[in-house]
């Protein structure tokens, strides 16, 4: 059994047994980045008894908050830092959060949190699956803990473009504008997937030679997030050496010029030490590894590959050790319960939070169990991930199966993760001066 000790263990078990308070509590990051003069959407994540009434003090001109849903929308104002006070009130009390809307060049000032279809539905994914995920995100209250993106991975595209070259959807996705409107109406954001090659990894149409046109189409569809893979571009890449940055730089210019805030997620499995140049090419995050699967060997391997990467993460630019494998997963096969033990899942979620990784659930939300729910609504763990200082946990040392990681936080404190990667319970001691001398 793999165990998480000390800070992790305490906070995970407390939350699992605690009843959700009925008084309002606002969650999520306390900073949000947006670019001027673009559509703005942010749902105030707040738990507590409904109905809830939401107010925002100091909201800049151009933005309004819906007092019943807590959705802030409108057109983003000029560059500036707008300090606002988010207020959520119900019959049992009120909560306030000082919240900065930082209008400038940077998006994703804290790691993206949401859901992606791949780890459960693979290429089988349908419009209905996406709508269900959006519905459950709201009905279970996950949205109130800060989970916000609903991302379609591979499997939405057609095999041929329209006569004018526009990308077409396959029959499983009759109308992406309607789907996107549906997602946005709930205060959620809409993500999509493509590849710089002619084909995606699943064999559908990629963006090669249609990059600008595809971004225009995504604008029309209301896309907020692009996961950009590498498949079928790889052959060209290896033929033309040192070409790894090219497709990402090329796509980035169209993303930057688009009229939407599109979070740019690079998915090229860590090739060419992408963490050293992912930020330069405009990436808000970049995969640092190959694909995750729901085994301890996979989670352990991916985690160990993050040991030297903490220096490369910063607000708006994150290392991504791949999406979460919690709950019901399945890829292209029938869905099944994730094969990680509960302790392994705690370690996976706890460490991905410490690593300031984008947190993308990859499970069937319609079948979510109480254990998974308690894990992914653990606001103390999520807060580590969403901390505005934006530091990734640094690896401090390991002794046999015990590893120690530490993450400085905005309030001046440090989160410490002491994890046991072995199969037996162990007692260990950690000298705090070793942690304070760690380089971040
Ligand atoms: C690659 C990516 C996965 C997924 C698939 C889709 O393998 O790494 O996350 O997007 O492609 O085909």
Image: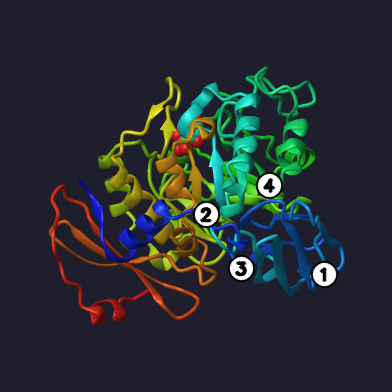
Q: Are marks 4 and 2 in contact (CB under 8 Å)?
A: no
Q: How far separated are the C-alphas under marks 1 and 4?
A: 22 Å
Question: Element at badge 3?
Answer: loop
Q: Nearer the viewer, mark 3 or mark 2?
A: 2
- Mark before the other along the chain sequence, 4 or 2: 2
Q: Nearer the viewer, mark 1 or mark 4?
A: 1
Q: Let me know if residue 357 appears in the view.
A: yes
Q: How far separated are the C-alphas under marks 3 and 1?
A: 16 Å
Q: How far separated are the C-alphas under marks 4 and 2?
A: 31 Å
The quadrant the C terminus occupies is: bottom left
- Residue at 16% across, 71% down: 429
Asked if 187 appears above or below 390 in the picture, the reply is above
| Left or right of residue 254, residue 139 in this image | left
Residue bearing the label numbered 2 = 20
Image quarter of residue 434: bottom left
Question: Element at badge 1?
Answer: loop
- Mark before the other along the chain sequence, 4 or 3: 3
Q: How far separated are the C-alphas under marks 3 and 2?
A: 21 Å
Residue 380 in the image, given as x and y percentages of width and height: 45, 62
| Left or right of residue 80, residue 46 in this image | left
Q: How is the image coloured?
A: rainbow
In the image, 46 versus 339, the foreground residue is 46
Residue bearing the label numbered 3 = 30
- Mark before the other along the chain sequence, 3 or 1: 3
Q: Are marks 2 and 1 in contact (CB under 8 Å)?
A: no
In the image, 328 versus 69, the foreground residue is 69
Q: Let me know if residue 234 appears in the view.
A: no
Asked if 217 appears above or below 175 in the picture, the reply is below
Residue bearing the label numbered 1 = 60
């Amino acid at each position: 059994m793999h165990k998480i000790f000390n800070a992790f263990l305490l906070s995970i078990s407390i939350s699992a047994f605690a009843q959700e308070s009925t008084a309002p509590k606002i969650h999520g990051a306390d900073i949000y980045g947006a670019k001027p003069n673009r559509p703005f959407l942010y749902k105030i994540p707040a738990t507590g008894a409904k109905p809830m009434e939401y107010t925002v003090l100091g909201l800049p001109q151009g933005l309004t908050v819906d007092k019943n849903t807590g959705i802030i929308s409108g057109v983003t104002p000029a560059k500036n830092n707008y300090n606002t006070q988010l207020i959520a009130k119900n019959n049992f009390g009120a909560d306030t959060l000082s919240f900065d809307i930082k209008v400038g060049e940077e998006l994703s000032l804290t790691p993206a949190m949401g859901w992606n279809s791949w780890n459960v539905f693979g290429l089988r994914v349908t419009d209905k699956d996406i709508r269900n995920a959006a519905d459950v995100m709201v009905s279970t209250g996950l949205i109130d803990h800060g989970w916000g993106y609903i991302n379609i991975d591979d499997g939405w595209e057609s095999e041929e473009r329209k006569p004018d070259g526009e990308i077409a959807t396959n029959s499983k996705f009759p109308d992406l504008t309607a789907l996107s409107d549906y997602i946005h109406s709930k205060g959620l954001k809409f993500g999509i997937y493509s590849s710089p090659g002619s084909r995606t990894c699943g064999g559908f149409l990629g963006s090669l030679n249609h990059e600008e046109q595809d971004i225009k189409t995504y604008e029309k569809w209301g896309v907020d997030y692009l996961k950009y893979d590498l498949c079928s571009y790889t052959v060209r890449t290896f033929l033309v050496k040192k070409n790894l940055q090219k497709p990402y730089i090329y796509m980035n210019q169209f993303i930057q010029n688009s009229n939407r805030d599109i979070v740019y997620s690079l998915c090229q499995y860590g090739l060419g030490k992408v963490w050293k140049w992912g930020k330069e090419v405009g990436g808000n995050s970049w995969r640092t590894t190959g694909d995750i699967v729901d085994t301890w060997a996979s989670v352990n391997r991916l985690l160990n590959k993050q040991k030297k990467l903490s220096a490369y993460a910063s607000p708006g630019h994150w290392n991504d050790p791949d999406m979460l494998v919690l709950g019901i997963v399945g890829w292209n096969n029938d869905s099944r319960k994730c094969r990680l033990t509960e302790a392994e899942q705690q370690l996976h979620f706890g460490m991905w939070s410490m690593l300031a990784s984008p947190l993308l659930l990859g499970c069937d939300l319609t079948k979510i169990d109480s254990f998974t729910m308690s894990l992914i609504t653990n606001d103390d763990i999520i807060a580590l991930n969403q901390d505005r200082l934006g530091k990734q946990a640094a690896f401090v040392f390991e002794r046999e199966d015990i590893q120690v990681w530490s993450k400085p936080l905005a309030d001046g404190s440090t989160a410490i993760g002491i994890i046991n990667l072995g199969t037996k319970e162990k007692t260990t001691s950690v000298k705090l001066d070793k942690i304070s001398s760690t380089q971040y």
